[in-house]
Image (cartoon, rainbow, N blue to C red):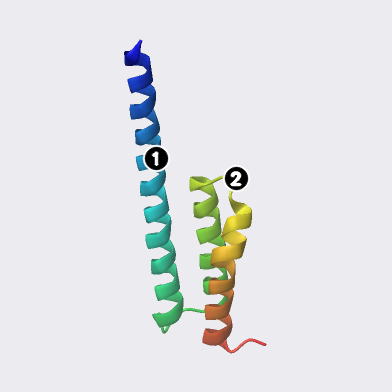
């Protein structure tokens, strides 16, 4: 009887580990996107907007039901960097 419970624990831990990997991957991706937005001297406003949109698509591919979290955490950062970089009002 203890064997099925042990499998659930392992499955659960594996799911937690996978979730943590996906979160870390998302954080790394967003750091890279923000870095490019800040430092690429040849980046145009259209390219920056497309990069931000692509990052949202990638994030939602990893976490399909977390659009609100993305909009609360990452969208303001991306908007702030784009506004500062291109001096938008």
Residue 12: percent from the left, percent from the top? 40, 32
Q: Are marks 1 and 2 in contact (CB under 8 Å)?
A: no
Q: Which of 76 and 84 is in front in this view?
A: 76
Q: Distance between the residues labelled 1 and 2?
A: 17 Å
Q: How crowded is mark 1: few (under 14 residues within 10 Å), some or many (20 or more)?
A: few
Identify the image quadrant of the C terminus.
bottom right
Q: From this viewpoint, which residue is outermost toward the right? A: 89
41 vs 10, left or right, is: right
Tag shown at residue 16: 1
Please say if 68 is above or below 10: below
Per the image, the residue denoted by label 2 is 65
75 vs 8, left or right, is: right
Q: From this viewpoint, which residue is outermost toward the top? A: 1
Please say if 14 is above or below 1: below
5 vs 52, left or right, is: left
Residue 33: percent from the left, percent from the top? 44, 68
Between disc 1 and disc 2, whose residue precedes? 1
18 vs 87, left or right, is: left
Label 2: element kind: loop
Q: For the residues carrying marks 1 and 2, which lies nearer the camera in this image?
A: 1
Kindly indicate the quadrant of the structure image that contains residue 30.
bottom left
The structure residue drawn at horizontal position 40% and vertical position 74%, both measured from the top left corner, is 35
The structure residue drawn at horizontal position 33% and vertical position 21%, both measured from the top left corner, is 6
Tag shown at residue 6: none
Q: Residues within 10 Å of mark 2 (few under 14, many from 20)?
A: few
Residue 74: percent from the left, percent from the top? 54, 65
Residue 84: percent from the left, percent from the top? 55, 86
């Amino acid at each position: 009887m203890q064997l099925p419970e042990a499998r659930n624990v392992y499955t659960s831990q594996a799911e937690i580990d996978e979730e943590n990997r996906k979160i870390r991957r998302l954080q790394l991706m967003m750091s890279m996107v923000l870095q490019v937005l800040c430092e690429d001297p040849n980046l145009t406003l259209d390219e920056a907007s497309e990069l931000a949109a692509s990052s949202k698509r990638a994030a939602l591919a990893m976490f399909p039901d977390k659009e609100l979290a993305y909009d609360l955490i990452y969208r303001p950062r991306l908007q702030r960097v784009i506004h500062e970089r291109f001096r938008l009002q």
